[in-house]
Image (tube, rainbow, N blue to C red):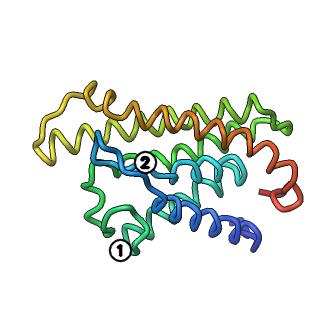
Amino acid sequence: MMIRRVNTKNMILTAFFTALIAVGAFIKIPNPFFPVPFTLQGVFCALAGLLLGSKYGSLAVTVYIIMGLLGLPVFTAPAGPQYIFQPTFGFLLGFIATAYIIGKVSELNEEFTYTKAFASSYAGLFVQYALGISYMYVIYNFYNKSPIGFWALVSAMSLYFLKDIILYSVVASVSVVLRKSLSPILQER
């Protein structure tokens, strides 16, 4: 049986990004067209994947979600296990996939380029919205019994998607510079 050690540096970086994601949840701008505010959680999830890689980036998001499901006030709405019935919970699950996919694509070879940063960010963003909107559709139509069409949800979420394309583009650009300048800290992920 092989036992893997997790070094202190990776634990600290994971905890740091978990905290950033929690802070990002509270940096919010109300949306007058839909009851879900604009937040920066996704930006920090993407940055976690880009800088920490698939394993520790997705771990940071998973720890954040577990904290919220345990009742710690890290979500934008009241937390606890009942949060899984919130229409937006699918986006939180999508954040795990986002960080993992972005991290995995960014790990494909040694050279980390702007093209790779943008491609991985957009791939993660697409999966995040696919999971989030699908979950929202199921909750609205089958749990809340508030029928809404799938394409109506896609349309309603398009403003968020456009906002995230812009923010993820900024994060992708910044991540290339950060990975170079923080390479001594980020090595051995």
Q: Residue at x 40, y 75 (%)?
A: 72
User: Mark 1 highlights which residue?
Assistant: 71
Q: Amino acid at mark 1?
A: Gly
Q: Image quarter for residue 146?
A: top left
Task: Count up the numbered dots.
Answer: 2
Label 1 crowd bin: few (<14), some (14–19), many (20+), radius 10 Å: some
Q: Image quarter for residue 177?
A: top right
> In the rendered structure, are the residues bearing label 1 and label 2 in contact, judged by CB atoms less than 8 Å apart?
no
Q: Position of residue 116 (x, y in %)?
A: 73, 32
Q: Position of residue 25 (x, y in %)?
A: 46, 59
Residue lying furthest front:
32
| Residue 54 vs residue 41, the one in the foreground | 41
Q: Image quarter for residue 20?
A: bottom right
Q: Residue at x 59, y 46 (%)?
A: 100
Q: Quadrant of the N terminus?
A: bottom right
Would residue 189 be found to the left or right of residue 119 on screen?
A: right
Question: What SS does tag 2 mark?
Answer: strand
Question: What SS does tag 1 mark?
Answer: loop
Q: Amino acid at mark 2?
A: Phe
2 above or below 141? below
User: Mark 2 highlights which residue?
Assistant: 38
C-alpha span from label 1 to label 2: 22 Å
- Disc sitting over residue 50 in the figure: none
Would residue 169 be found to the left or right of residue 64 on screen?
A: right
Label 2 crowd bin: few (<14), some (14–19), many (20+), radius 10 Å: some
Q: Residue at x 41, y 33 (%)?
A: 159
166 above or below 96? above
